[in-house]
Amino acid sequence: MTVYFLIVRYLKDEERPDATTDVTEVGGEAFGELLGMPPEQLADVYPLTHKHAERVRQLTGITLDLETYDYFLETEAD
């Protein structure tokens, strides 16, 4: 089973994603550390907040515009 990590962006108050970026290459260890949980437990949707913004930028190069969008780290498995 392969686990994929995606950063999904939604315009505030919208239900459909505006953009999805595959960030799987960063790896579960880094995202587990970011969210404060063991990487093997990453199996859900996690909101990304101001607390996460700088580390997300360092890991992925994505700057979170939290005034305009809501961001989530989502996991998918095949």
Image (spheres, rainbow, N blue to C red):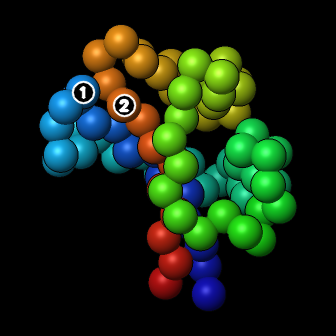
Image quarter hosting the N terminus: bottom right
Q: Secondary structure at mark 1?
A: loop
User: In the displayed structure, does residue 9 sit left or right of residue 3?
Assistant: left
Marks 1 & 2, CB-CB < 8 Å contact:
yes
Residue lying at the far top of the rendered structure: 67
Is 27 placed left or right of 67 in the picture? right
- Residue visible at 69% across and 33% down? 59
Q: Is residue 4 above or below residue 72?
A: below
User: For mark 2, what is the residue?
Assistant: 70
Can residue 25 be seen here? Answer: yes
Name the residue: 27% across, 36% down: 10
Horizontal and vertical percent position of residue 3:
60, 72
Give the mark nearer the N terminus: 1 vs 2.
Answer: 1
Tag 2 secondary structure: strand
Residue at left 80%, top 46%?
36
Check residue 12 in the rendering and tell me which mark sits there, or answer none. 1
What residue appears at the point 36 percent right and 12 percent down from the top-left corner? 67
Percent coordinates x, y for residue 52 in the rendering? 64, 27
Outermost residue toward the front?
13
**Rendering coords of residue 31 (x, y %):** 71, 48
Residue 57 visible in image: no
Q: Amino acid at mark 2?
A: Asp
Mark 1 to mark 2: distance in Å?
Answer: 6 Å
Query: What amino acid type should be assigned to the residue bearing mark 1?
Result: Lys
Q: Can you tell which mark lies on residue 34?
A: none
- Where residue 22 sits: x, y (%)? 47, 51
